[in-house]
Image: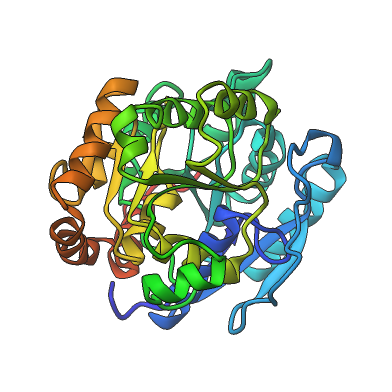
């Protein structure tokens, strides 16, 4: 298997679309090509209609297209005639398999239709970030069922999602491999350099909350944890770096209510790729106080930049952060989170946990993910339908 060259298309967002899935797809494509395969991306000409997109923009406003990979900007999610066109392109190219990135039921009709049109000639695998969405809407079950039953096999990056697949399909053609590390945001820089870049105080103790802000990510819980009087005395700051995908006023009200203006640093914008490393390298601890989760790219960026993490015991987060070694796995409770924050800084755990992260991160290299993916393809080669 190691020496067999495979041709495949990754169906999912890529440049100039922005965000974690696009970054992941570009990384995966590049790593597959490094291993001798012929991998290309089929991205979206229209991913979301603007009225359905909660952020400021779907597109990169800085940086440039990744080099060394082919990106075909083809899929229109709301035009059925386009789905036929995309399927025709795939059939003409005759790949060994396609890998469809799936994280939201909205994509079920378009991606499910494309899969059904090509599955008699090529294997259809799905990379499932979510099967059951964090925020439920009418039609979720029907759209996901339509998509799932168009696929030959599934790879998931959390065991929770792997188990969720069984609610829609009884297939045994599914595999688990943890989310690999992102490697596209640049090398590690010193904490001093990162803080100078972001104009942060060199003496502060900084907890980073990073990424798009939605209710299920529990930023409000973390803000409340910061109200502990001892945390305030320790000069601990919460750095919030990300764009609000919901009304930010309730969060501002919490900061006002608990008199945290001097303890919260709010960088409420989409963080450009070239700036991501500075936020992680500037921090002492990365926090993900999620109410719900499957897997998280934020955790893997944390690993790449060798940062200890505090995560809640939900979804796949606890699977990849060894408790009291690379950070803390905690119950979703304000007092518990406050206590662990205090313990981390009072007992000076940063250096110990960082050394453990450096060792643990070796598990999350791309070679292992590709090994599992190509193995899944091999397991589905019988009885093509």
| Count of numbered circles on the image | 0
Q: Tell me, yes or no, if residue 155 can be seen here.
A: no
Location of residue 238 by image quarter: top left
Q: Is residue 23 left or right of residue 78?
A: left
Q: Position of residue 270 (x, y in %)?
A: 66, 53
Task: State the residue in front, 33 or 356.
Answer: 356
Which quadrant of the structure image shows residue 6? bottom left
Where residue 206 sits: x, y (%)? Answer: 39, 52
In-image side of 159 versus 239 (left or right): left
Which of the 4 image quadrants contains residue 228?
A: top left
Q: Position of residue 227 (x, y in %)?
A: 40, 27
- Which residue is painted at 18% across and 60% down in the image? 360
Of 322 and 106, the residue lying toward us: 322
| Residue at x 34%, y 53% (from the top left corner) | 376
- Looking at the image, can residue 163 be seen? yes
362 and 209: which is toward the camera: 209
| Most distant residue in the top direction | 138
Q: Residue at x 34, y 40 (%)?
A: 158
Depth check, front residue: 301 or 257: 257
Q: Is residue 335 above or below residue 179?
A: above
| Colouring convention used in this rendered image of the protein | rainbow
Q: Quadrant of the N terminus?
A: bottom left
Give residue 183's position: percent from left, percent from top: 43, 71
């Amino acid at each position: 298997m190691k020496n067999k060259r495979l041709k495949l298309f990754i169906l999912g967002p890529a440049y100039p679309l922005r965000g974690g899935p696009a970054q992941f797809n570009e990384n995966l494509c590049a790593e597959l090509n490094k291993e001798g395969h012929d991998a290309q991306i089929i991205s979206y000409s229209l991913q979301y209609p603007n009225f359905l997109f909660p952020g400021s923009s779907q597109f990169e406003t800085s940086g440039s297209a990744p080099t060394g990979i082919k990106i075909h900007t083809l899929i229109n999610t709301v035009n059925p005639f386009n789905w036929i066109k995309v399927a025709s392109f795939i059939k003409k190219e005759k790949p060994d398999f396609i890998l469809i990135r799936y994280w939201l039921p909205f994509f079920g009709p378009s991606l499910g239709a494309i899969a059904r049109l090509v599955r008699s000639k090529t294997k259809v695998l799905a990379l499932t970030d979510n099967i059951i969405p964090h925020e439920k809407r009418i039609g979720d079950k029907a759209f996901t069922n339509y998509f799932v039953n168009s696929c030959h096999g599934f790879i998931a990056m959390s065991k929770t999602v792997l188990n969720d697949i069984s609610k829609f399909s009884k297939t045994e053609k599914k595999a688990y491999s943890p989310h690999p590390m992102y490697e596209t945001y640049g090398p590690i820089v010193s904490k001093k350099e990162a803080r100078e870049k972001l104009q942060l105080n060199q003496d502060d103790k900084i907890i980073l909350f990073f990424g798009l802000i939605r209710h299920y990510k529990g930023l409000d819980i973390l803000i409340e944890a910061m109200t502990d009087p001892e945390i305030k005395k320790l000069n601990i700051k919460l750095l919030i770096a990300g764009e609000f995908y919901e009304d930010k006023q309730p969060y501002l009200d919490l900061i006002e209510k608990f008199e945290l203006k001097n303890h919260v640093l709010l960088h409420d914008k989409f963080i450009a790729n070239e700036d991501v490393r500075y936020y992680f390298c500037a921090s002492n601890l990365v926090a993900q106080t999620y109410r719900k989760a499957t897997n998280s790219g934020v955790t893997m960026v944390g690993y790449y930049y060798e940062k200890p993490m505090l995560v809640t015991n939900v979804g796949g987060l606890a699977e990849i952060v060894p408790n009291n070694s690379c950070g803390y796995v905690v119950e979703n409770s304000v007092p518990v989170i406050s206590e662990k924050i205090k313990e981390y800084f009072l007992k000076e755990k940063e250096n110990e946990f960082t050394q453990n992260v450096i060792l643990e991160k070796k598990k999350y290299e791309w070679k292992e993910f590709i090994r599992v993916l190509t193995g899944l393809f091999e397991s589905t080669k019988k009885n093509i339908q």
